[in-house]
Amino acid sequence: MTIGSRIRQYRREKDLTQEQLAEYLGITARAVSQWETDRTAPDLSQLPLLCNIFGVSSDVLLGIDVSSKQKKIQEIDDAAYAVACTGDHKTSLQMWLDGIRQFPDSFQLIGRYIAEVYMYAWRVEDKELHKERALAYIDRVLADCTDSRIRYETIRIACMWYPKIGMTDEALKLAETLPETTQSDMKQRIYTGTKKHEQWRENIMGDFTNAIGLLVDYACLQDDDGNDIFTDDEKLRLCETLIKMFELFFEKGDYMFHAQYPEGACTLMARIYASRKDSENALECIRKAAEYAAHFDTYDYEGVQQSLIARGNIPGGIWRHDTHNNTYELLEWLRTQSVFDFLRENPRFGEIQKQIEGTAV
């Protein structure tokens, strides 16, 4: 089929007359008639309008075999990548450029060219020309590319590249469009001086506390058959590791709201020891859980952490889902867990419970 016959086909499928199509395009019905009889062809500037009206891609309207086109693009990409792996970046860059000239709308090739220029253009003679082209292609990807993977990779490269050429503000704006975790990483790369230190500190603390916060749940995971993945002894070791790492990280005891994590580890350990009727260890774990809960409930929201890694950080307050504090919830948990029944007549258990009651709200 010719482009004229395809225009006629899609016009009829949309139940449009030649006059109606001409009106949408701002041309005469005679011009549409000449297209459909292949006497003339649409101007390139009219193709996007035709595609929007018919609801088809430019490849479909022009009769391009999409699968064959993509196969050729992939072959070019693979061949250029193979050459790049040999270290011949001058040739690989040219191969990607030649591919883009052949398929100017291929963001796959454009994205790979941008990445190759960023990584290796300094090794070739005409590096400045490649950099100029790649930076222009970045603008094009950001403006027109809808492939999320290519857009993400291009934004990531731009965030690392822009600060080196005096475009720090532009890099920060792009970083704001990334997912939160990636955004933090990009800002860490973009900032300098004090801001860089603050962002780096925030990232390290976030990664550490996220891992610590998940460790108790990790210890309690089950397999597909509902069986515990870790034995009770292994759960105890995981919780002990959590507490040791936590206290090393916050060596000055400025746990702030992060105290909830070792508290959770202590309650799990207390339950395991209680199930073994090991009163000494169970009571010690309950005591430590109460200490962490009290710290969580009473820390200064405006306080500044002094532990070396966290130094200068102000965690601030937290949102509570109800009116009770952590100590109250720990007290209610102890009262409802039958595994601790054998301890209720123990004087030490009574002392710990009284201490908890004194701060429970």
Image (tube, helix red, strand yellow):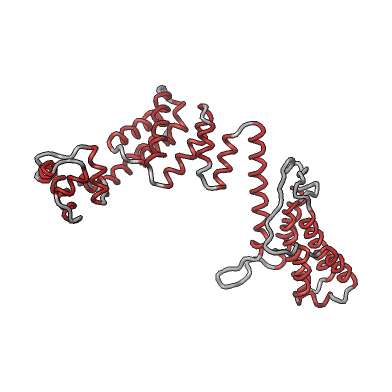
Residue extending farthest to the right is 347
- Residue 245 at x, y percent in the picture: 73, 51
The answer to whether any part of residue 227 appears in the image is yes
Taking the spot 10% from the left edge, 45% from the top edge, the residue there is 33
- Residue 182 at x, y percent in the picture: 54, 45
Vertical relation: 93 (above or below) 338: above
Left or right, residue 78 beside residue 170: left
Taking the spot 52% from the left edge, 38% from the top edge, the residue there is 173
Q: Quadrant of residue 239?
A: bottom right
Taking the spot 17% from the left edge, 53% from the top edge, the residue there is 16
- Residue 295 at x, y percent in the picture: 79, 56
Taking the spot 23% from the left edge, 51% from the top edge, the residue there is 54
- 57 or 25, nearer to the observer: 25
- 206 or 5, nearer to the observer: 5
- Residue 294 at x, y percent in the picture: 80, 59
The answer to whether any part of residue 88 appears in the image is no
